[in-house]
Image: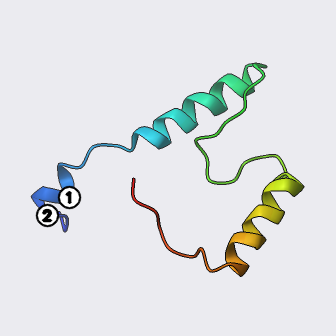
Amino acid sequence: MSFLSERVKGLKPSATLAIDAKAKALKEQGEDILNLSEVKPDFETLELIKKACIKALEEGFTKYVAT
């Protein structure tokens, strides 16, 4: 007996997760990969970006912008 609704069963896998899996597989094969599909990049945020974020917060830029 399944506890998932038909709507949930019809969901397709995440394209982002598929890209992440492909990037990880290529990295394991020795490819030089900068994987931007994962939530946790493996590099530090640049100091310039950190300072710009702090400045924006201090100036009240805390809302989403139109896309």
Q: Which residue is mark 2?
A: 5
- Real-space Cα distance between discs 2 and 1? 5 Å
Q: Amino acid at mark 1?
A: Val
Extreme residue in the front direction: 59
Between 54 and 41, the residue placed more toward the observer is 54
Residue 14 versus residue 24 in the image, above or below = below
Residue 38's tag is none
The residue under the point 20% across, 58% down is 8
What secondary structure is found at the residue carrying circle 1?
helix
Location of residue 51 in the rendering, given as x and y in whole percent from the top left corner: 83, 64
What secondary structure is found at the residue carrying circle 2?
loop
Left or right? Give the position of 1 relative to 13: left
Q: What is the quadrant of residue 34 in the picture?
A: top right
Location of residue 19 in the rendering, given as x and y in whole percent from the top left corner: 51, 33
Location of residue 16 in the rendering, given as x and y in whole percent from the top left corner: 47, 41
Left or right? Give the position of 46 relative to 21: right
Residue 38 versus residue 55 in the image, above or below = above
The residue under the point 14% across, 63% down is 5
Dot 1, crowdedness within 10 Å: few (<14), some or many (≥20)? few
Q: What is the quadrant of residue 21 in the picture?
A: top right
Dot 2, crowdedness within 10 Å: few (<14), some or many (≥20)? few
Q: Are marks 2 and 1 in contact (CB under 8 Å)?
A: yes
Location of residue 63 in the rendering, given as x and y in whole percent from the top left corner: 50, 74
Q: Which quarter of the rendered picture does the N terminus lie within?
A: bottom left
Instruction: Tally the marks.
Output: 2
The residue under the point 39% across, 44% down is 14
Between 13 and 2, the residue placed more toward the observer is 13
Q: Which residue is mark 1?
A: 8
Q: Amino acid at mark 2?
A: Ser
The residue under the point 69% across, 70% down is 56
